[in-house]
Image: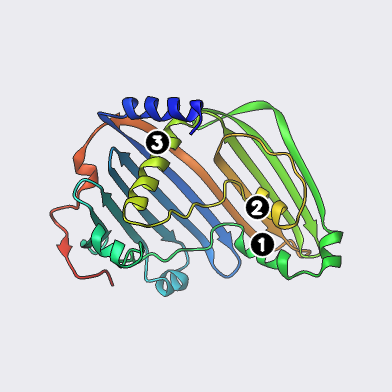
């Protein structure tokens, strides 16, 4: 660990000794045949404690029914008691497992939340890119612009990066904003990673930048900017101007007084063996 990393660890350890950090972000997706889907995610992090809750709202009735209705589910990691909880706020149910049980399962949690992982990133785009022939990949056009000036995004000074990828499939436009003021983000990430590693697991992070992932996949050289992403938009359009739109934005990130109630299951919830 280098000198800067040591200073960062010591600083954040003292800074958050009696506090916690709360992050809220919102993902909006509008796709053909699916319609609009909005996912709101809130994370709470304190020393040895982590909670994540996600609520999904689907506007189209048939799609909503196929997905089992709108949901609000979450999980809690308690490193002090070495317990993991999953819960369904809508059904007011929860289940729990010990870190020892997870270790015996190769570091993989046994209990799952009822909200499956949605492919909200650039995976589908990468899949199309990888399925193209070498000739088609060579015909793709890439354009990337990094703004000179900073923009204010959710209270942070952020630099905007615009990336355009034009191919036989159509046009992909990425707009991403990065900040170098990452102390709060670092703390939340470290708490979660440390807890997952404590039961033998491995934290899978989403890509730092979806445009960078696609450019790397296409073996394109590009200029990057330092920091953490606080907002992005992605649009994909074909020759008929039909396409897919996704917007992710940090709504807030703040340090607040520690509140143990944020890391406990509601007493109104019923304990079950597993969530349906």
Alpha carbon separation for disc pair 1 and 3? 31 Å
Please report the residue visible at 17 percent of the width from the left and 59 percent of the height from the top: 269
Sort mark 2 into few (<14), some (14-19) or many (20+) by Cα contacts within 10 Å: some
Q: Are marks 3 and 2 in contact (CB under 8 Å)?
A: no
Q: Which residue is mark 2?
A: 213
Left or right of 276, for residue 153: right
Secondary-structure class at tag 2? helix
Residue 215 location (% of width, % of height): 72, 52
Q: Nearer the viewer, mark 1 or mark 2?
A: 2
Alpha carbon separation for disc pair 3 and 2? 24 Å
Q: Which residue is mark 1?
A: 125
* Residue 261 higher or lower than 17, as above or below: below
Please report the residue visible at 27 percent of the width from the left and 44 percent of the height from the top: 49
Sort mark 1 into few (<14), some (14-19) or many (20+) by Cα contacts within 10 Å: some
Residue, far front: 1
Sort mark 3 into few (<14), some (14-19) or many (20+) by Cα contacts within 10 Å: many
Q: Which is more toward the observer, 101 or 91? A: 101
Q: Which is more toward the observer, 146 or 218? A: 218
Q: Nearer the viewer, mark 1 or mark 3?
A: 3
Secondary-structure class at tag 1? helix
Give the mark nearest the N terminus, 3 or 2: 3
Q: Which is more toward the observer, 109 or 167? A: 109
| Quadrant hosting residue 111 | bottom left
Secondary-structure class at tag 3? helix
Q: Which residue is mark 3?
A: 187
């Amino acid at each position: 660990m280098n000198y800067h990393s040591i200073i960062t660890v010591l600083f954040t350890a003292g800074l958050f000794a009696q506090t916690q950090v709360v992050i809220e972000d919102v993902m909006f997706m509008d796709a053909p045949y699916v319609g609009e889907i909005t996912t709101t995610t809130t994370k709470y992090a304190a020393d040895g404690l982590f909670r994540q809750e996600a609520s999904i709202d689907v506007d189209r009735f048939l799609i909503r029914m196929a997905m089992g209705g709108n949901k609000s589910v979450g999980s809690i990691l308690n490193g002090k008691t070495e317990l993991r909880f999953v819960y369904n706020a809508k059904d007011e149910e929860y289940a729990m497992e010990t870190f020892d049980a997870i270790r015996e399962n190769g570091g993989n949690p046994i209990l799952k939340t009822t909200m499956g992982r949605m492919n909200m990133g650039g995976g589908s785009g990468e899949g199309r890119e990888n399925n193209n022939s070498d000739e088609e990949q060579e015909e793709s056009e890439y354009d990337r612009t990094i703004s000179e000036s900073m923009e204010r995004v959710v209270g942070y000074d952020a630099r905007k990066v615009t990336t355009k990828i034009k191919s036989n499939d159509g046009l992909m436009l990425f707009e991403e904003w990065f900040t170098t003021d990452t102390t709060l983000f670092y703390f939340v990430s470290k708490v979660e990673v440390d807890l997952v590693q404590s039961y033998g697991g491995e934290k899978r992070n989403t890509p730092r930048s979806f445009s960078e992932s696609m450019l790397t996949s296409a073996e394109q050289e590009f200029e990057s900017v330092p920091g953490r992403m606080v907002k992005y938009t992605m649009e994909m359009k074909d020759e008929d101007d039909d396409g897919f739109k996704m917007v992710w934005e940090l709504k807030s990130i703040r340090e607040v007084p520690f509140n143990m109630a944020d890391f406990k299951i509601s007493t109104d919830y019923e304990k079950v063996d597993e969530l349906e």
